[in-house]
Amino acid sequence: MVGEPNGSLSAADIAARRPAAAGRDSLYARLASRPEVAGAILLAVMAIFLSAATPTFLSQENVLWVLYSFAVIGLASIGMLLVLAAGDIDLSIGAQIGLAAIIAGRIVFHHPETPDVLVFGASIASGMFFGLINGIIVTKFKFNAFIATLATGYIGRGVIVIISESRNFTGFSDDLSFVGQGRILGIPNLVLILFVLAVFWTWVLRRTVFGKYLFAIGGNASAARLSGVPVDRIRMLAFVLCGAMGALAGFLLACRLGVAEQTIGVGYEMEAVAGAVIGGVSIFGGIGSVLGVVIGSAAMAVIRNGLVLLQIGAMWQLLATGSIIVAAVSIDGIRRKIRG
């Protein structure tokens, strides 16, 4: 305007700029409020770092290794999401993975004539039964989920040793091997299965009564119960479905490896928890999304692969996984305090 110093702004200019600034602030606020963002940032940072640190990271063979690992962790982490959303946890999911794999391996080894669909069904049924036991112990006998599933996980490992006869089982059919090892349009079948189930579970959690009840229980179980929500029934169903997802991960892992051994699934309980919490799932319940779990699982697979490529020892890998979980839970706690 005439008579104003150079560089000064009129009231009209300031008013015009306010909506743009408000829009930017609103965008930043929305991004900051999304629990998945931290996992996405971690994934991007790790991918960039490993690409620069080791040329092997972007090789075709290594990328496939990461994708296979991502798929198995992702399936287990989605199962973990179901129980975490309700305010519970399932530390027996590693044993569920191993039990499903051993059952499938034992059947194809001793009874090779068994139809593949029955092998698959037996594996999934084992996980669902495992989950049902967990659900009964937690909801009917009122055991703490952490203690209960930690105990059943050890029991499950003992059952695996007995069933495995201390041997490795081979003999998976060509069709089962294709499911675990094959690719369609260059994309591993396991990843395609993960994506299909991710879409399915997104719909379930967002659009169905079960999904709404699940998060309501995790947010405030007492209020949900007073509102008429069948709290114990929903929590039990969450454990059963978690068992099904864990069993699916174990079955597909055995198909991928072409062998079922008693150590399959060891340590996956922590990776499933890490994949979930990195993706923004609250360890306290009531918050989480399948998208976040997929992102968190991808980050976990990249981290796991990076530690191997950088020749980090096994003990340090465990330390790294534990540290990541602690950091993610701490961030979740801070976020909850900010929300009030």
Image: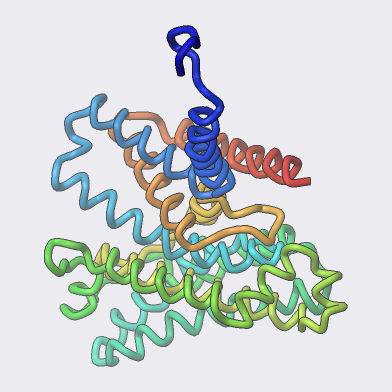
Q: Where is residue 217 in the image (x, y as percent from the top left)?
A: 74, 70
The answer to whether 155 is drawn above or below residue 53 in the figure is below
- Which residue is outermost to the front? 2
Colour approach in the figure: rainbow
| Residue in view at x 31 percent, y 28 percent | 49
Q: Where is residue 138 in the image (x, y as percent from the top left)?
A: 76, 71
| Residue in view at x 36 percent, y 34 percent | 46
Q: In this view, does 321 lie to the left or right of 225?
A: left
- Which residue is outermost to the top? 5
Q: Is residue 282 in view from this perspective? A: yes
The answer to whether 101 is drawn above or below residue 311 in the figure is below
Quadrant position of residue 231 = bottom right
The answer to whether 267 is drawn above or below residue 13 in the figure is below
Q: Is residue 102 in view from this perspective? A: no
Q: Where is residue 94 in the image (x, y as percent from the top left)?
A: 51, 61
Q: In this view, does 223 lie to the left or right of 331?
A: right
| Residue in view at x 66 percent, y 72 percent | 214
| Residue in view at x 48 percent, y 7 percent | 5
Q: Position of residue 315 (x, y in %)?
A: 48, 33
Figure label count:
0
Q: In this view, does 21 lie to the left or right of 326?
A: left
